[in-house]
Image (cartoon, grey):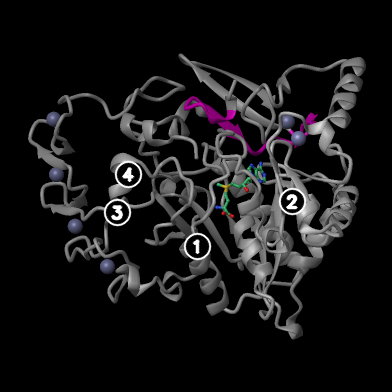
Amino acid sequence: MAANTAANVDVIIDTGGREIPECPHGPALLFVKYDRGSSSKFFACSAFRDRKECNFFQWESEKPSEEKKKIRQEINSQQKPKFSHEEAYNRFLRFKEQTSCNRELCQTCGRFLLPGELKDHKGHKVKSPITDEMLEKPTKLFVPLDNNKTFAQYLFSASAVDFTIKTLEDLSFTHIVCVGAPRIFEAIELKKDSATKGLLLDLDHRYQQLYPTTKFCRYNMFNHHFFDGQKSEDVFKQFILEEEEDGKRVAMVMDPPFGGMVDALAATYNKISLQWQTLSDQTQDSNLPILWFFPYFMEKRIKECLPTTHMLDYKVDYDNHMLFRGDMKKQGSPVRIFTNLSPERVILPASDGYWFCKVCSRFSAKENLHCDVCDLCPSKDGRTYKHCFKCDRCVKPSKQHCKTCKTCQQQDHRCGQPMSNGCHVCGALDHKRRNCPKQGSSSTKRGAPENSSPNRQKRKRKK
Ligand SMILES: C[S@@+](CC[C@H](N)C(=O)[O-])C[C@H]1O[C@@H](n2cnc3c(N)ncnc32)[C@H](O)[C@@H]1O
Ligand SMILES: [Zn+2]
Ligand SMILES: [Zn+2]
Ligand SMILES: [Zn+2]
Ligand SMILES: [Zn+2]
Ligand SMILES: [Zn+2]
Ligand SMILES: [Zn+2]
């Protein structure tokens, strides 16, 4: 069951101090599932969406016996990668001693092979020779796990990498925490003349081979879990610690798989930001600068969780992205950058048509024309919106004002149809479950209603 991505499932962040069971991927998340007016709560794996990969499940009310707990602990320790980080890295150092013609990478296992190991990989896809240059770009060398729901490895195009690196450099950041962003980390590593440093946090253990423990931590971004425990946490803390006199400036870049787990990701960011604040003696209201890559249609959810973020107009291009098909492609990538940096400071490339809107004090996309009535550049999805004087706002060009519904609607809509299937808790049509007055101690703690038309739900496909 892909519990954590279904439309009728929420994550409960505030677990009220109860004991959190652990699966091999760290502390489980508490979920609530709504079904025809009733709800049930359960713990499940935070990282793996496919039960075949992690089948951990426990009802919230369940009290597992000591025996069951023991069995679980055994399962947890059995599921570790075959090699520890140190072992994997030491093997890699030996691997590098071979000439490129003698180097073999099993792409099926994602493992660099040492002499004599090839025989154990019969029928696997093995790549050879492996040059030093190839080893500098592991995101090109490894097969991207892009048909895997958990990893959802969609890699930035060269232009998206260049833009991100340039932005971070222009804003004088020197230390970049790359969460699920191996290509950004790789680009930083490749810039040997630059003072910028990176730390990669990612679930993919293949990187343990190439990067030492000081540069890569195997990490779960949905529960802020370091697989190597305190050792990794210390590396991380050292990395984010800013000291006034040494000119170090930290920022975080995060490109998660995009299921519906915004709450969990925001909770992780808040933990990291708080750690940075405390360790670096920042003032209480300062937040760690972040660039969070996510689809534009999640804007409301992100802003509910992190109210100080802005969505930039920059369309983030990927090399291997599912959503770049058909109609979506015409409008460019649906992925944007959410940031707590002041938008006017993030210069979007004029060569791609971005322009500076003086009124909005930020860069807008070519097609995003400023509306004097709304007093903003309204487009979100890459199309030019038009102003509807009856609705008193700008709307998507595909919509038309419907006299019956008294709002702008898609041409093929059925008049009078509710915008959604109603609230999962009480069934009312005028609000979503997040705003249900009957929700009590709700799973999420925010205000504005979620704008989830059926179409919108359909679009919430996974990355
Ligand atoms: C959408 S891809 C982003 C890659 C990025 N665009 C790049 O080119 O560097 C998601 C990344 O997050 C990693 N990932 C997936 N689930 C994760 C988790 N629970 N915790 C940490 N990293 C995860 C994947 O291995 C992958 O590198
Ligand atoms: Zn798990
Ligand atoms: Zn193999
Ligand atoms: Zn504007
Ligand atoms: Zn308008
Ligand atoms: Zn209208
Ligand atoms: Zn109508």
Residue 226 position in % (x across, y down) = 79, 47
Residue 7 position in % (x across, y down) = 47, 27
Crowd class of label 1 (few under 14; some 14 to 19; many from 20; radius 10 Å) = some
* Sequence-first disc among 3 and 2: 2
Element carrying mark 2: helix
| Range drawn in magenta | 4-27
Element carrying mark 3: loop
Q: Which residue is drawn at 20% across and 52% down?
A: 393
Comparing 79 with 433, the one in front is 79
Badge number at residue 207: 2
Q: Residue furthest left?
A: 403
Q: Inspect the image, locate mark 4, and give the three-letter code of the amino acid beneath it.
A: Met
Report, in whole angstroms, how far the alpha carbon at label 4 lies from the one at label 1: 20 Å
Q: Is residue 440 visible?
A: no
Q: Do the residues labelled 2 and 1 touch (CB within 8 Å)?
A: no
Number of the front mark, 4 or 1? 1
Q: Which residue is drawn at 88% across and 31% down?
A: 77
Report, in whole angstroms, how far the alpha carbon at label 2 lies from the one at label 1: 20 Å
Asked if ligand 1 lies within 8 A of label 1, the reply is no
Element carrying mark 1: helix
Q: Inspect the image, locate mark 2, and give the three-letter code of the amino acid beneath it.
A: Tyr
Q: Do the residues labelled 3 and 1 touch (CB within 8 Å)?
A: no
Report the side of 235 relative to 322 (left or right): right
- The residue at which mark 3 appears reads as 382
Crowd class of label 3 (few under 14; some 14 to 19; many from 20; radius 10 Å) = many
Report, in whole angstroms, how far the alpha carbon at label 2 lies from the one at label 4: 32 Å
